Image: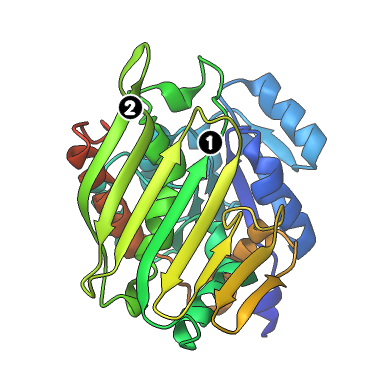
Amino acid sequence: MSESGREPLRIGILGAARITERSLVAPARAGGHRLVAVAARDRARAEAFAAAHGVERTLGSYAELLADPEVDVVYNPLANGLHGPWNLAALRAGKHVLSEKPSASNAAEAEEVREAAAKSGTVFMEAFHYLFHPLTLRLHELLASGELGELRHAEAMVAIPAPEAGDPRWSLPLAGGALMDLGCYSLHALRVLAPWAGGAPRPLSARAGEREGAPGVDEWLDADLEFPSGATGGARCHMAYGRLEMSIRLVGSRGEATAPNFVLPQMDDRIVVRTPDGERTERLGTRSSYTYQLEAFAARVRAGTALPLDADDAVTTMRLIDACYEAAGLAPRPRSTV
């Protein structure tokens, strides 16, 4: 890699979200990148975050962070409804953007983000970190090798215990809901199976349960999908479940493979493979999927290395999310204004 390819990213962080320590701070330290600045609505909270995580300085507003010439990458882990507006603002400011998923509140807004990314000429990526871990790559290898035979069915379930009542994930104006926060992983994991299923899936039907006291916000949603090959899919999510579950199961004509935690394989790196030859368990390593993700993003920014995720992919995912909401009798999420 060239010297420019080894140059550290200079990262600015929007907000002081709890996920950032795991999703960005630790990977940035591992890769030698700089955490240049953080801005939050509460300056004191930003200062505490900066002191705890070695961020070089605190800025007074998100706009000030976007205007900082020393920041070349913006990480956006804000509430779902703030992804689109601040992704647009960061791209228009000429910054590279690593955005937590989903990239926007609905497909129309995601298309605007895509247009802004094209005009800016900078790198935009939605943070589907699971896709970069060897566990997901191995699942795809099992299909590509033919060991599982032709793909017949795929199902993914992503569920967590309920967040607190005041959590923004329960807010419709902030684009909350189980499908937005969790089910996007299930849908994306099925979407990327297209090479082994004749193309992208389409929703056949969906069912959802609304959160009590939060009309229009899905506490859970189940979507049934169909691929052009005739293979079927089930994308499930639940945001008030009894336990954490993030599993995927691929069923082929000759065997099947199950990963108990494909979203966070650093917690459980197993794949269980069952074929006529028997059953085996493969372990793919507990190095963080977020670390693999930031390495890939940095390689794209600094050396032009290809990525499997871009603004086009984000639009496709958002269109599928909207379609699943509509199939379940719920409206796509409204866009937020800032």
Q: Label for residue 64?
A: 1
Left/right placement of residue 97 relative to residue 245 reads left
| Number of other residues with Cα within 10 Å of mark 1, as a class: few under 14, some 14 to 19, many 20 or more | few
Camera-nearest residue between 282 and 72: 282
Quarter of the figure that contains the C terminus: top left
Q: How far is mark 1 from mark 2, CA to CA? A: 40 Å
Question: What's the amino acid at mark 2?
Answer: Gly
What's the mark number on residue 209? 2
Say which mark, if any, is on residue 228.
Answer: none
Instruction: Tell me what residue is drawn at x 60 percent, y 46 percent.
Output: 12
Residue 253 visible in the displayed image: yes
The picture places residue 275, in percent across and down from the top left corner, at: 54, 79
| Residue lying at the far top of the rendered structure | 213
Q: Amino acid at mark 1?
A: Glu
Q: From the top left corner, tell me how far across and down residue 28 is, in percent.
A: 72, 56
Circle nearer the N terminus (1, 2) = 1
Q: Quadrant of residue 6?
A: bottom right
Query: Does residue 172 sit above or below 194 in this rendering?
Result: above
- Give whichever of 150, 94 is nearer the camera: 150
